[in-house]
Amino acid sequence: MALSKRIIKETQRLAEDAVPGISAVPHDDNLRYFDVTIDGPSQSPYEGGVFKAELFLPDDYPMTPPKIRFLTRIYHPNIDRLGRICLDVLKSNWSPALQIRTILLSIQALLGAPNPDDPLANDVAQAWKQDEQAAIATAREWTEKHAKP
Amino acid sequence: MDSAHLEERPHKKRRFFAENSSPIAVTPIRHPSPPPLASPDPTPDGIATSPAPVPDDNKEDHGGVSLEGFDIGLLQVVVGELAPSVLQKLKDISGNDVQRAINLYLDGSWNTARPPAPATILPSRPPSVQTTLPGSLTRRESERSNASTPASSTSTPLAPVLKAMPTKRYLGSFGAVGWATKSGTGMIRHDENIGIERVKTQPRLGKGGRVRPVTKKNLDIVVRFTNDRGAEVGRLENDSADWISSLMDHKLCSFEASCVYAPERLRTGDTVYLQLRCYLLRTAFVTRKFTRSDPGEEKTIFESEESEEERDLQRRQVALVKLFEAINLHPTRMNESAEKHKRQGLLQAAEMAEKKEQKTKMKSGEAVDLASSPPSDAAEEGQELEQDQLDTLYKKAQSFDFDTPELEPADTFSMHLRKYQKQALYWMVGKEKHESLKHKEAVMHPLWEEYEWPVQDADNVSLPIIDDQTMFYINPYSGEMSLDFPRQEQNCLGGVLADEMGLGKTIEMLSLIHTHRTEPPKHEPSSTFKNLPRLLKNSATVEPAPYTTLVVAPMSLLAQWQSEAEKASKDGTLKVIVYYGADKAVNLQKLCCAANGANAPNVIITSYGTILSEFNQVAALEGNCGSHGGIFSLEYFRIILDEAHYIKNRKSKTAKACYDLSAKHRWVLTGTPIVNRLEDLFSLVRFLKVEPWSNFSFWKTFITVPFESKDWIRALDVVQTVLEPLVLRRTKDMKTPDGTALVPLPSRTIDVEKIVMSQDERDVYDHIYMRARRFFNANAEAGTLLKSYTTIFTQILRLRQSCCHPVLTRNAKIVADEEDAALASDLVNGIADDMDLSSLIERFTSGGEQDVNKFGVHVLKQIQDETDAECPICSEEPMADQAVTGCWHSACKECLLNYINHQRDRGVLPLCFNCREPINARDVFEVVRHDDDMGLNDNLRSDSLDHAPPSQSQPPRISLRRIGLLGSAKTQALLTHLKANRKADRTIKSVVFSQFTAFIDLIEPALTRDNIPFLRLDGTMSQKQRAAVLTEFSTSDKPYVFLLSLRAGGVGLNLVAAQKVFMMDPWWSFAVEAQAIDRVHRMGQEHEVKVVRFIIEGSIEEKMLRIQDRKKFIASSLGMMSDEEKRLQKIEDIKELLS
């Protein structure tokens, strides 16, 4: 399938006008498939970590949202073991006006503001609710362990 | 003779005699003064009772009267038996000139005349007279014995060439069989010279001089033979007697015979074998009076079956053909292609004539009236031509001689003619001035055959040779004979100009009008036009209009004729008026008559409708056309019928009205002289008054009958000979010998644009489609397809309309049909369906116009700022067709609608892509930018909200429009094209065709909203309105879009001002669309023409295209509901449409 003008433009802008702490580079053999890195936001348990993710643009993008998944293990109530992300703009609140860049920023923001009331990883959310400090420590630990370059 | 012999004869013979004896009581007119001397009674009575021989050799008889040097044989052959005293007197007063004697006798003047000096009253008529009347049909035998006939009719002197011919000339011999009516020994011996004679009752005149009808049953065909003593021996067998009698009666031949075998002792009924020698009589070649029936009579012949005379004529033809067969004489020259068909065809035609009558009657009972055909108020007859036959015919008629000289038009003609147009002018002027084309070699008339006189008789004895007469000619179709070479002459001072559409027939005709015209004389001749032919049956005089050309054209073309006529003439050189018939103030007769020469209009343009209505008025005045003062009160210098296939049906009133127009020169213009039947051509020929083809019986015998009996080659060959001298036809794709096109036209591209319906439209379409299928399937199962044919077709129509615009299916008229359909099917279900459909359509049309004024300036400002921005959805920059949501967020219109549909498909409430406010398609507004139409139509901007532009940056003014109002996918596609065209070229004009005027109604407001100036032409407009609209379109500088209905605009119009053509909906045959396209792509078009045909994807329209490809014509069958087979065929097509 031919690449739409929109994807080409987005890719160009991601390269030329990069957002600090975020990168997305398409594969050479599949321009709909991106290697993504997101820096952990400062003053969060993920600070200092660089989280890898994969992003795929489906055929009917931008009518449907991109598919995105963390590859780096992360301890977060809204991200499960497989790296799947619970975020409204990736699901029901998707709008074609959103872009790769804005989605990634949203994910970065999610890292800074975990929401255990709408969990995807139930055990993490449970822990987070019961003992937030301990959970944050675990998150930090995981970051050290998995997300350090 | 004893009566015993009579008793021996078969019973019916007696009856025969008895029958013939009675009318003899009426004094035969041919004996104005009864012969004083007792001559053999010429009546059958005499023969029945007294067998006294009728003298065979005239020279022996008539004792006492000196008749040397006077050819009594000829005289008596022509006028019948005469008393010796009568003969003597005739000889005296005629000065031994037999011809004169015949004439004197026949005109009755011999009784009173004194012997004059013969030379003075022998005006010789040029020989050509004989050949210019090759096919006159109505030669009348009866006239020769009619004392009341004016002298001129019978005193036609012999042409010089005839004088050189002996009274009779040997032609050939053949064997024949007879039987004896006498018995006796030595009645007749081998080798005895036998006389062959014919005693026939002369045509008997009843009261009022009318010829009593002679039917085949009681026709007297008895031919007797006598021995050399002059005593009757027997009669020829009926087979041969049948035609021999008719040859003798028509004074074509005389026969001598010798006995080949006869029994020594002859008994009544014995067979006698004879050898007959046939002599062609000089009288056979005598030019007799050919009467052209007066119009009134002609009409009755034309309308009813063949008349008595025609039957007589046919007997004569058949007799000749049989004779030539018997003596085995073959033509030395004849129309090659016709050779193998002619003879057999003639006999066949005679045979079929009777059967035909009934068939035609039956046929005309079936109404075959196509809805699409021009005014045909009566059934058409004749088989349709297959396409390949038509092609062949045209190909033959199209052999245009590129070396035809050119003729420069008169100075008063202001336009430039192309080469082929000058050639046409040359040809037309030649036709009108009756100059036979000199560079052409004399061609024998196609219907004639050339025969060589035999130089030896059957016994190889040389026959006398006559100088300059080695050949004679026979027209086997009319039975005419001639010693002169029958040249093919053009006998019509006009013709058929059948150039293909777009080659400029109108211009060619106008150049003719300018070039060949009569100038008003300085002082007019007074009473010379009183003795001119009369029109209709009444005595009203028809005045000549020697300076006037009458142009008859379809209503929609009147204005075009007028403007072209004015354009083509230098100022003041041509007076043109358009005559609508309605203004009773104008008395055409006074205006156009010769006396008013200086002020008479040169051209009167009128419509077929006017002709018809005046024809009816004149008919109401009982044919008193002179006093009517209208079109029929004049004999024009020239008549031109434009689009003459309007009169293709000879039975239609319009055609009949046109036949009755009088003029010196008659022309018809048509691109299709034959639409689908050979009879179409007949009507034109009839209008042109081309003899003899304008007689329908003649036409029928030689064209219709052979054609319908599958003898196509012969029929088409004959048609070709009719066409060849009459028709000038060139086609656009014709190439001159050096390979250049006749008319270089700019190229033309036709694209089919597939359009996807919006979901709402699709819902409506699917709904109708499912219903049509259900109905079709139900009927197919029940086997009632034929009965419900109309309903099915209505539903197909509905489907096609919903492709254009769903609202069309709500057309009031259609709803009525639909109600019928609903009644026919399940009533309850039907109503439920209808409700359903209504709600669907409501969904489509809901939401009125948003009051744009309520939007704040800031909103507009914001939208305007975004005008050049990127589309947030597709990143197009700037947005293609910017649209905004109800919450004022901009995106491409398409992206926005796609997204809304996308959400709806997934069953979620559509939200704004930006602010996630709920929206729906009704709440989307298109942003209309006015940068591309500035300076145009300021008055049209009623519903737009103008934004005062800041003084410097001049951002475009914009207004908002609810997208739903744009209507259907097709209208949107059209607008997209129009706007793109407008951007590319500000002056471009376009033409939009649709077959649904209701759809045009819906396109109009869309154009208005986009400030696209448009014009419209449809069938409801009056002539004046049409003219105004056409003029505006071709002369204005505005980039008009011309909306035309396919019906009203498909024919004749000239729309070369446009360069783009949009076909909104497909018609069943592409030919109809192509004709519409040719309105733009025709002579005068200087630009490339682009045609876009809009087709809805995945709809019935796609299937129609497929049917078009297969060249099927469902529509043409619409009027033929009676024809079961055709309907079955159409059902197949419908199956495909609904598959």
Image: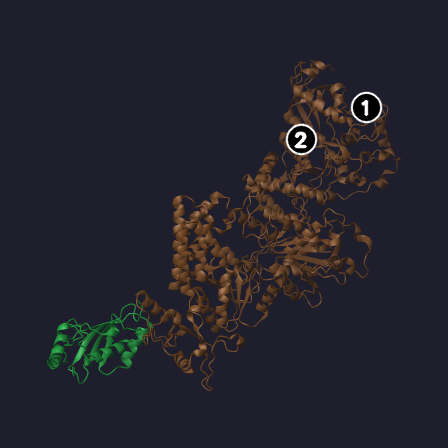
Chain colours: A green, B brown
Q: Residue B57 in the image: state x and y as whole percent.
A: 77, 24
**Left/right of residue A68 with respect to residue B627 in the rendered view:** left
What is the quadrant of residue A55 in the picture? bottom left
* Screen quadrant of the N terminus of chain B: top right
Above or below, comparing residue B243 to residue B507 in the picture: above
Q: Amino acid at mark 2?
A: Thr
Q: Within 10 angstroms of label 1, few (less than 14), some, or many (20 or more) residues?
A: few
Task: Evaluate whether residue B614 shows in this view.
Answer: yes
What is the quadrant of residue B525 in the picture? bottom right
**Left/right of residue B660 with respect to residue B784 in the rendered view:** right
Q: Amino acid at mark 1?
A: Ser
Q: Residue B1025 in the image: state x and y as whole percent.
A: 60, 65
Instruction: Report the front residue among B277 and B725.
Output: B725
Q: The disc numbered 1 marks a residue on which chain? A: B
Instruction: Report the front residue among B732 and B1082.
Output: B1082
Which residue matches tag 2? B215
